[in-house]
Image (spheres, rainbow, N blue to C red):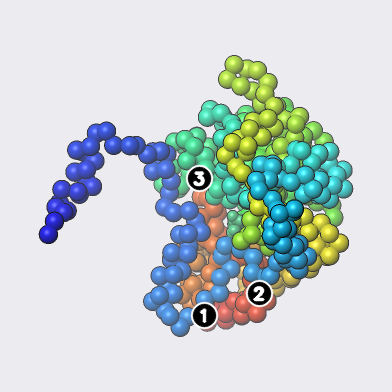
């Protein structure tokens, strides 16, 4: 029998004895631990294995639980039938998305709010998370990049992967990034920086804090971006949760934003498409950035080129489902979904407040941001909730150093689970 000499294949020996081996993107080695949500899942799974009778309630990742709106399902079933008939069958669609969907989005999501966005400035994709990372393909490597702290980790990690940062310090902050702290003191809205930054990530309604931005706050950012030649990456994935009629839903409600902002949106959190996958990115044709030789370049052209080369579009069936969001039935069903999750958020806020905790967010956003009690660290509180209450949330420190001492509870679950989780937390805190 043939025996492999395992000793010969020990990694350390392979590394030193194979100088011509393919190399990796070393930037990945700078990343801290796993991506936050897989890391939480790993810890929860190991707890579940050791405690098989525990009825765990997950209010961690912002993943929807309620069924797709009927209007979307009906449209997708019809689209499947289209695919079964040669006369209506679809092969490759346009990489940018079908015109009929882009037109509806332009009209309902932007023009109806006074935003001057045309259908061909809208690019349909399979997710905002993907687009937030992919957008870096078309920007240079020497930009100064600002993120809030805490922040949706995708903005930071994709910049690390792209080599836009140095190493992380012991607090998890990457050298080279500009961190804009947000806390209860500044209403979780960052102060406009005094230094020049080139690319700025803003997310409103905010993940993870549930905070919102007033029109005046966004105006200050647009003014700053225009004065400094900066570009704002505006993540509006949760805009459907805005209940206050005075709050802007889109950065393009601000005059001048067409010249300095890209907006990311998603069907995940309004119509429950987290598993179905459909999103959009808006790149106005008036948005200009500079090439290395100082010439003006239309960003739209680069994104169009990038998408046509690396992406083949979202499936016809899914785009038909997304289109149905804009039908009268779709609009009313989506509204009901949002109200359902917002009622969950209200229950979470009220119960946690009654339990003596300080809570933020959860009024125009599906996330409630909680101050951990008794000086517990975010991960200590995570363990306490998991072990005592069998409830999963997200440690604030996973969103950045300034998230330490906070905890995020998501309103995405069914009513029974939310009520049961709040009951357990209330009792757990009393004992
Ligand atoms: C979250 O929990 O922060 C979200 O699920 C992230 C996402 O939508 O990618």
Report if the beta carbon of the residue with label 1 is closer than 8 angstroms to ligand 1.
Answer: no
Residue picked out by circle 3: 157
Q: Report the Cα–Cα distance between label 3 and label 2.
A: 31 Å
Q: Is residue 425 above or below residue 23?
A: below
Please tell me how crowded label 1 is: few (under 14), some (14-19), or many (20+) other residues with Cα within 10 Å: few
Q: Earlier in the sequence, mark 3 or mark 2?
A: 3
Q: Is residue 305 above or below residue 184?
A: above
Residue picked out by circle 2: 414
Q: Nearer the viewer, residue 232 or 86?
A: 86
Q: Position of residue 241 (x, y in %)?
A: 75, 59
Q: Earlier in the sequence, mark 2 or mark 1?
A: 1
Q: Report if the CB atoms under discs 1 and 3 are less than 8 Å apart.
A: no
Q: Earlier in the sequence, mark 1 or mark 3?
A: 1
Q: Which mark is residue 55?
A: 1
Tell me, yes or no, if residue 130 can be seen here.
yes
Q: Which mark is residue 14?
A: none
- Under tag 2, what secondary structure? loop
| In the image: residue 330, left or right of residue 47 | right
| In the image: residue 264, left or right of residue 117 | left
Q: Report the Cα–Cα distance between label 2 and label 1.
A: 14 Å
Q: Position of residue 95 (x, y in %)?
A: 66, 42
Q: Nearer the viewer, residue 302 or 61?
A: 302
- Under tag 1, what secondary structure? loop
What residue sits 84% from the left and 65% below the top? 329
Q: Position of residue 389 (x, y in %)?
A: 52, 77
């Amino acid at each position: 029998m043939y025996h492999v000499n395992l000793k010969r294949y020990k990694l350390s020996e392979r590394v030193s004895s194979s100088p011509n081996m393919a190399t990796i993107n070393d930037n990945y080695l700078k990343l801290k631990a796993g991506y936050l949500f897989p890391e939480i899942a790993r810890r929860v799974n190991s707890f579940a294995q050791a405690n098989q009778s525990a009825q765990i309630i997950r209010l961690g990742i912002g993943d929807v639980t309620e069924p797709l709106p009927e209007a979307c399902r009906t449209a997708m079933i019809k689209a499947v039938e289209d695919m079964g008939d040669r006369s209506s069958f679809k092969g490759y669609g346009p990489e940018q998305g079908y015109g009929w969907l882009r037109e509806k989005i332009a009209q309902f999501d932007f023009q109806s709010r006074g935003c001057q966005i045309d259908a061909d400035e809208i690019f349909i994709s399979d997710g905002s998370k993907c687009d937030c990372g992919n957008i870096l393909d078309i920007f240079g490597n020497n930009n100064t990049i600002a993120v809030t702290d805490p922040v949706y980790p995708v903005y930071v990690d994709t910049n690390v992967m792209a080599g836009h940062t140095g190493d992380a310090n012991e607090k998890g902050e990457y050298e080279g990034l500009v961190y804009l702290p947000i806390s209860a003191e500044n209403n979780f809205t960052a102060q406009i920086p005094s230094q020049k930054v080139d690319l700025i990530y803003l997310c409103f309604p905010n993940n993870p804090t549930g905070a919102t931005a007033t029109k005046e706050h966004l105006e200050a950012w647009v003014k700053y971006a225009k004065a400094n030649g900066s570009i704002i990456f505006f993540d509006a994935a949760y805009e459907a949760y805005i209940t206050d009629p005075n709050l802007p839903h889109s950065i393009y409600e601000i005059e001048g934003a067409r010249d300095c902002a890209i907006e990311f949106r998603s069907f995940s959190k309004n119509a429950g498409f987290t598993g179905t996958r459909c999103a959009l990115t808006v790149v106005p044709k008036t948005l200009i950035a500079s090439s290395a030789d100082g010439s003006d370049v239309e960003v739209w052209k680069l994104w169009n080129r990038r998408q046509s080369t690396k992406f083949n579009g979202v499936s016809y069936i899914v785009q038909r489902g997304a289109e149905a969001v804009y039908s009268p039935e779709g609009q009313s069903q989506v509204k009901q979904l949002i109200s359902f999750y917002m009622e969950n958020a209200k229950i979470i806020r009220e119960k946690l407040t009654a339990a003596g905790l300080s809570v933020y967010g959860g009024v125009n956003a599906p996330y409630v941001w909680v101050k951990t009690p008794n000086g517990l660290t975010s991960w200590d509180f995570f363990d306490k909730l998991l072990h005592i209450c069998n409830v999963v949330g997200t440690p604030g420190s996973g969103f950045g150093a300034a998230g330490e001492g906070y905890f995020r509870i998501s309103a995405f679950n069914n009513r029974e689970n939310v009520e049961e989780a709040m009951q357990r937390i209330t009792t757990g805190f009393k004992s």
